[in-house]
Image (spheres, rainbow, N blue to C red):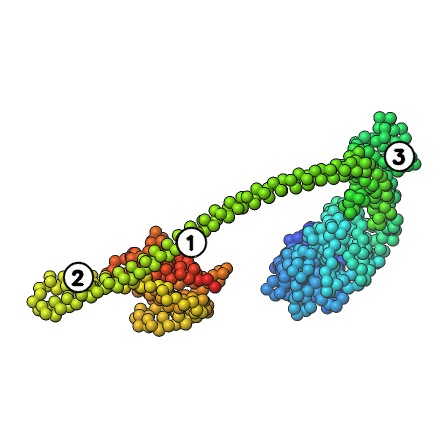
Amino acid sequence: MIYTQKEGLSSNDVWDIFEDSQGNLWFGTNGGGISKYDGEHFIHYTEKEGLSNDKVYSILEDSYGNLWFGTKNGLSRYDGESFIHYKEKEGLSNKIVMSILEDSRGNLWIGTNGGGISKYDGENFIHYTEKEGLVSNAVRCILEDSRGNLWYGTNGGGVGKFDGRNFVHYTEKEGLSSNMVWSILEDDNGNIWIGTEKGLNHLITPKEGEEIEGASIYNYTKQDGLKGVDFLLNSSYLDSKGRLWCGSGKCLTMLDLNAYNLSVEPPIVQLKSIEIQQRVIDFRNVPDSLGSDIIFNGVAAYCNYPLNLELAYDQNHLVFHFVGIDWNAQHKIRYSYKMDGLNENWSIPNTEPKADYRNLTYGTYAFKLKTIGESQVWSKPFVYTFKIHPPWWHTWLAKTGYAGATLFLFFAAMHWRTVSLTKRQKKLEQTVGERTVEVNVQKKEAEEQRYLVEKKNKELEEFAYVASHDLQEPLRTVRSFVDLLRKQFGTELDDNADQYMYYITNATDRMNELIKGLLDFSQIGKRRELKTVDCNVIIKDIIADTNNLIKNTKTEIKYNNLPCVRAYETELRQLFQNLLNNAIKFRKPNVVPLVEVYCKEKNDMWEFGVRDNGIGIEPKYKDRIFRMFQRLHTRDKYEGTGIGLAHCKRIVEIHGGSIWMESEFGKGSVFHFTIPK
């Protein structure tokens, strides 16, 4: 009897079939929802009747008699009267439900296409994804075996087993025919049968406590008699007579497990022949042209390879031809081999019945060969031993000659080297004597130059001090007479004369400031005393001394955890005060000045920084600002003599450090300087 839409089925594309406890058949379809058949009539359940989606992948009846439907748009539970839906909002990991299973404890396991597996205990969902150890989040089918383990097949990740604590994975690497798994089934002997898109797999599970290596996987494809190997979703079934039914895209296949027997014996492996230097040789009739290049004392029975083979050094390209015999499944033969003395590990198993070795060096070798077939048991290794002789220049006689020649050359070289070193030593002693005289002369000249420089510097400092000190006296005289003129003749002077008096007074004040700055500059470091100075205390004192200026300009000065340094306290205080005063002086209009003092370690130096948010300095002036009497602004805009930063440079230099500036015009500046630790 054939049932189609004509007979009452909701859709001809049926994806799942289920018989409930009342004997009703439920059909999940592709686009037609659910069709229930009671033996006489069809009843349809679609989105219109409350189903979450009309594409139904899986059906299950739980121990309470509720029906569960896995659809493209979530999980639906039907209690005989109404539907209840479960999607991501209700706690499901993904809305595309491919498979449903109720375990022996009454928990529901829901396999989704992208969200892994969700376990539902009736109240809460627990999710298992790749993050928790799942091999893939695309789960197509789920099985609970007789031991209580959960098995799941995935789309691209193979098969996984979950014992409640740990995940174990079986993939193509472990012997699975494909990682695209469509169905999983357990037979009466506790073995797992897996339908993939490339064939049927029989997995004999490890015993309790065994590792994954204890599992054996047997593959069955078209060469084993299958007509179709592209199995469909949940298409396997074990009937009551012990027959395994599998549906594929080509046909329905039945395997009677009662008559199914596995091979337990390993295949037979045998070496057939050996090629030497790409020549196929009949070792029972070796041509005379080979001479002493190939030596052996017999040929293996029924085969064409020599016994106790010895080869000349240039006969070092060998190809071994072999064969494995498995009477049950010859097409499943795979070979693995290695060459002792050349390889430590066995080769990857493959089906090619030959091994090619080129450019073998001289020595004794043992070629080892083994094979595996349907029984998944390796044969006992076959061992073939042979020897390649060294060339004459690697013989003991040649090596003895090499040793004698080496000793002769060694002693000859030692004699030549001794004579050469003696000559070089004499010449070196002569050169050292000459250079010593030159160095002493240069040293004396350098000391004289240093003395002259120090003398000139001292004279210049004394001149600057005397000049600046003596220049102050006539300035004070000019200023005094101007004050007398204003006092005695102030009422008699006209406006022009009064203006001239102001210019004279202003000029003498500026000249006095310049002379004072020059005097201070000449005295920097005169009375130096190196001591340990706390920079935090210095900044705190400067803030106290300039409190009125800071309050009037609303300046905020930040500093924290500055180090204690070995420095000249007076000069270091002047350095910080000049930099802080400049940061306040060159502030931006209508912007509260913010100054930050910080320090960091850099190798054997302390690197200080004074950062402000002022008017900044154009890059073209970065070298000019540290010179004497250099001003970048007019006096009517910013007061000053142009000596402050020259003072800073001088102070840093007497400490053995350096000073530089970084600035962005219009945004602020950072003055860096270093002090040795």
- Residue 478 image offset from top left, x and y in percent: 17, 64
Identity of the residue furthest to the left in this view = 492
Q: Amino acid at mark 1?
A: Glu
In front here: 257 or 391?
A: 391
Image x and y of residue 88, in percent: 60, 62
Circle 3: element type: loop
Q: Residue 398, located in which quarter of the rendered image?
A: top right
Numbered label attached to residue 296: 3
The residue identified by callout 1 is 447
Q: Residues within 10 Å of mark 1 (few under 14, many from 20)?
A: few
Q: For the residues marked 1 and 3, what is the alpha-carbon distance in whole angstroms?
A: 89 Å
Tell me whether the residue at label 1 lies in contact with that at label 3, contact meaning CB atoms closer than 8 angstroms: no
Residue 279 is at least partly visible in this image = yes
Q: How many marks?
A: 3
Q: CA distance from mark 2 to mark 1?
A: 51 Å
Q: For mark 2, give the secondary structure.
A: helix
Q: Residues within 10 Å of mark 3 (few under 14, many from 20)?
A: some
Of residue 563 and residue 363, the one placed in the foreground of this image is 563
- Identify the element where label 1 is drawn: helix
> Do labels 3 and 2 touch, CB within 8 Å?
no
Observer-side mark, 1 or 3, equals 1
Residue 379 locus on image (x, y percent): 86, 47
Left or right position of 528 against 116: left
* Res 218 label: none
> Mark 1 and mark 2 in contact (Cβ < 8 Å)?
no
Q: Position of residue 662 (x, y in %)?
A: 39, 57
Please tell me which residue is depicted at 77% across the width and 45% down the height of the picture: 343
Is residue 34 at all visible to an observer of this figure?
no
- Mark sitting earlier along the chain (3/2): 3
Check disc 2 and report the residue beneath it. 503
- Specify the amino acid type for callout 3: Phe
